[in-house]
Amino acid sequence: MFDGKVARRKKDRTDNEKLFGIQLDSLCDVVAFGAFPSLLCYCMGVKGSLGMLAIGFYCICGVIRLAYFNVVETNNFFSEEEHEKVYHGLPITSIAVILPVLYLLHFVLPYTFPVLLMVMLFAVGTLFIADFKMKKPSNKVLALIVAVVAIAIIITFVYSRYKLMNGFVL
């Protein structure tokens, strides 16, 4: 979440190091926010032909989104003009918020949860490549997002422990 902020604070980087950082950041993002969530969705029940299509679609859209991001960032790097503080399409990192919050529905709708995951994969993948501008969140909004995800994770942990202590298997 803070990798870009940290990188921009390091002022003594060469142009090649900056461009390398853009590429390396996207490679890490495609693994952490593309491949890994896809694997999690598979493990949570997104299977079968339609499930594999949803996972493949999500991964491909994530790669396309990051490739587009790299092109925009590289063009911005060589441009002298000031740039808008917006995302073009939904950032791939948004899955780090969407998936934990959606997982809370697993406790309420355990049998339809894989279908919800599949719909989410198609929807989020589509938003990755959709042509819309989304304002980049401020630090206050980022802190709120982190708090929401932390609460979702705590609820999941507490509920899981409660079920296990009472003899239920999730």
Image: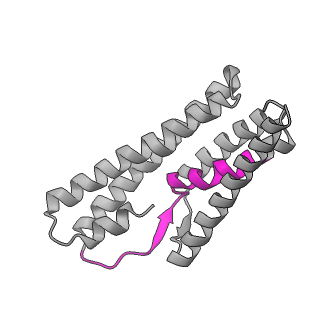
The image quadrant where one finds the C terminus is: top right
Position of 151 compared to 108: left or right? left
Residue occupying image coordinates x 56% and y 55%: 94
Magenta region includes residue 148: no
Q: Quadrant of residue 118?
A: top right
Front residue of 168 and 108: 168
Position of 69 compared to 36: left or right? left
Q: How is the image coloured?
A: one colour
User: x%, y% of residue 17?
Assistant: 18, 57
User: x%, y% of residue 106?
Assistant: 78, 41
The image quadrant where one finds the N terminus is: bottom left
Number of disc labels: 0
Q: Quadrant of residue 115?
A: top right
Q: Is residue 92 above or below residue 115?
A: below
Residue placed farthest to the top in the image? 48
Residue occupying image coordinates x 69% and y 60%: 151
Q: Which residues are magenta?
A: 80-104
Residue occupying image coordinates x 62% and y 71%: 144
Q: Is residue 166 above or below residue 81?
A: above
Q: Is residue 5 above or below residue 69?
A: below
Magenta region includes residue 97: yes
User: x%, y% of residue 150?
Assistant: 63, 59
Front residue of 170 and 164: 164
Residue occupying image coordinates x 56% and y 63%: 132
Position of 66 compared to 139: left or right? left
Residue placed farthest to the front in the image? 165
Position of 105 compared to 65: left or right? right
User: x%, y% of residue 41?
Assistant: 64, 34
